[in-house]
Image (tube, rainbow, N blue to C red):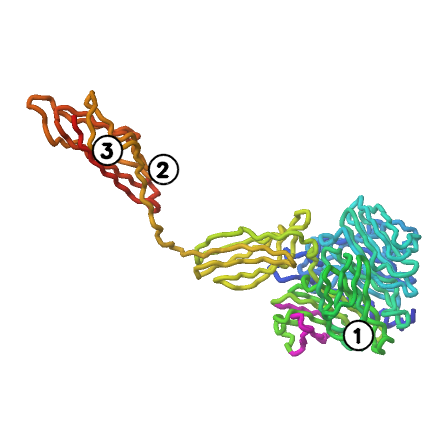
Amino acid sequence: MFAKPRWLAGLAATALAVSLSPLLAASPATAAERPDSLGKDFWLTFPRNHFGTPELQLFISGPTATSGTVAVPGLSFSQNFTVNPGVVTTVAVPDGAQLSAGDSGDPEQRAIQVTANDEVSVYGLNRIQFSTDAFMGLPVDVLAKEYVVLSYPALGQASEFAVAATEDGTEVTYVPAADTTAGVTAGTSTTKMLSRGEALPVSSSTGDLSGTVITSTKPVAVFGGQSCANVPDATIRYCDHLVEQLPGTPTWGKSFQTVPLKTRLNGDTFRMVASENATTVAVNGVAVATLNRGQVHQQIIDGQATITSDKPILAAQYSNGTTYDGVEADPFMMLLIPSEQFLNQYTFATPETGFARNFVNVVTADAGVGQVQLDGAVVPAGQFSAIGSTGFSGAQVDLTAGSHTMSSSQPFGIYVYGFDDDDSYGYPGGAAFASINAVAALTLTPPAQTVKVNTQACLDTTVLDKENKPLAGIDVKLKVEGVNPTTTSGFTNASGVLQHCYTSSKLGKDTVTATYGTLSAAATVTWVSATPPPTKRKKLPINKKKVKKSPVSLGQNGKVRLVKSIKTNKHGKTSIRVFCIPTKASAAGEVRFCDTNVTKKGKITVRSTGYDSLRVRVVVKAKPKKGQADTWRRNTWRKSWKVRP
């Protein structure tokens, strides 16, 4: 380690206390549903810095006025705080909350809990003279049960990680990628039981703990870094403490766009770690490594670039030491944010003093160029340049000291950093932490629907994990093909659902396709007239059984059955009229009559005497029942019989 002027180190710490104040928020339409770094409950810890007594501080800010408490249960420490929008609240934490190197291999009761009545963002600062770094805290609701560590090799100082438990009875299993100071050999699985508020520190005796796989039975907070690292290697001065709170593997990404650190020469150092075997990593479309689970690739990248992989990775950009290029600077570690986790709005601040040069790197989709605003003014499109053919563009924007806001109609990412004499700071301006790698199923319902024009059709895209649990904050793409062609996107809510509703003034059919990654589902919407044309009505049937042929003869009792039954279907009803018409009378003086009978089932009989000949005529009418007239129309059946004695 090489000494820096005492006044400068003190000034840097004061400046960082002011600078770490991003108020991370998505656009109002999505902020309430999308998991991000704002929260009401945090469990944090401070891994070991370089030798000496540390100054530990938390910087708390929020989008609304609120209050809360910082507590270290193992030290019987508790302090209330209040937050006003745009103002950073600083809480000093006892130096005893810093973890040891973990030589005993046992958990320590030094985890820190931050609770608030409303959502806040929390940053931690660990300062020892000439060795300072900070991390962005992640709330409990975005923590995971699987992590792969990204830190930095032990180049004279220890590579390290730490695990903090949020619940009692948490089993933590880790397989260190390097030998540890607790005597655990690289590759050996070790399990520890942690209680709420305990933290487990692990340091390497040699080598790099990057790639260590950590699993737990309940969600935990994990931190990775180095006690005092020389970047990119031990020949480059000066060393500095590195620490980041790491996201769980479900939130990792496959596509990262990078912009070089302004004023630096000959490129920046990048590291990528894989969570799955046979992960191919490419830089600017050229494969640079194939990594198995826990393996790390490190390289210098000079200029704007895109880092892609076929399976999820965690990536970080490192500022090199001052002697790397002769530029006033110092090491820092800054996690890269996958484009799927970009937000639409950020509030952040640079140091008020202590850093002569402050910058923000911006990455946005090409459609967002000319829409990104800094403090209400559009960032000129001319400041952006395309990042290859990725569809994204990047810019390096100078910042004045103080607080700033950035927003856009398109999601974008920001990285805030600054340099001074042998000093630097840098951090991503914020991110969503949706479990984008846990998506196992996607459905679109209803699969088909018929809707009248100028009314609304709604479709629900539901996203689930392999345990059929809903996933919030998943960015679903929707494409409509047909009479209303369009594309759109949106984030699933807490129930794992993205609802898309729209209307049409056109008749016809749309096919709607929802897509996330390689998963897709389709549904159809058929738009019909609000006053549909009348349908062709069917004639009610008149069903007759055993109809006698004419002529017929009366039986011995002067009676004959003409029809056994007459009926229609269930949508209509029948009326039957029978007419008896004498055509020739018998001898004078005889009794004459013609009697007809119709039963409910439509049986028709005739009884007659006194006529040598008569004619019987039947008229049957079928008409629709109530409510059936739009579908069925009337029908009539007529028949005559000549009847003889």
Was residue 1 drawn as part of the magenta stretch in this picture? no
The span picked out in magenta is: 382-408
Q: Residue at x 21, y 33 (%)?
A: 550
Disc with the residue nearer the chain's start (3 vs 2):
3
Count the marks: how many? 3
Q: What number is the disc on residue 267?
A: 1
- Disc 3 crowd rating (10 Å Cα; few below 14, some 14-19, many 20+) is few
Q: Secondary structure at mark 3?
A: loop
Given this view, does label 3 or label 2 mark the residue nearer the observer? Answer: 3
Was residue 387 drawn as part of the magenta stretch in this picture? yes
Image location (x, y in percent) of residue 510: 50, 59
Disc with the residue nearer the chain's start (3 vs 1):
1
Given this view, does label 2 or label 1 mark the residue nearer the observer? Answer: 2
Image location (x, y in percent) of residue 228: 88, 65
Q: Inspect the image, locate mark 3, and give the three-letter code of the amino acid beneath it.
A: Lys
Name the residue tied to disc 3. Answer: 549
- Disc 2 crowd rating (10 Å Cα; few below 14, some 14-19, many 20+) is few
Cα separation, mark 3 vs mark 2, equals 28 Å
Q: Is residue 634 left or right of residue 112?
A: left
Q: Is residue 480 left or right of residue 336?
A: left
Name the residue tied to disc 2. Answer: 570
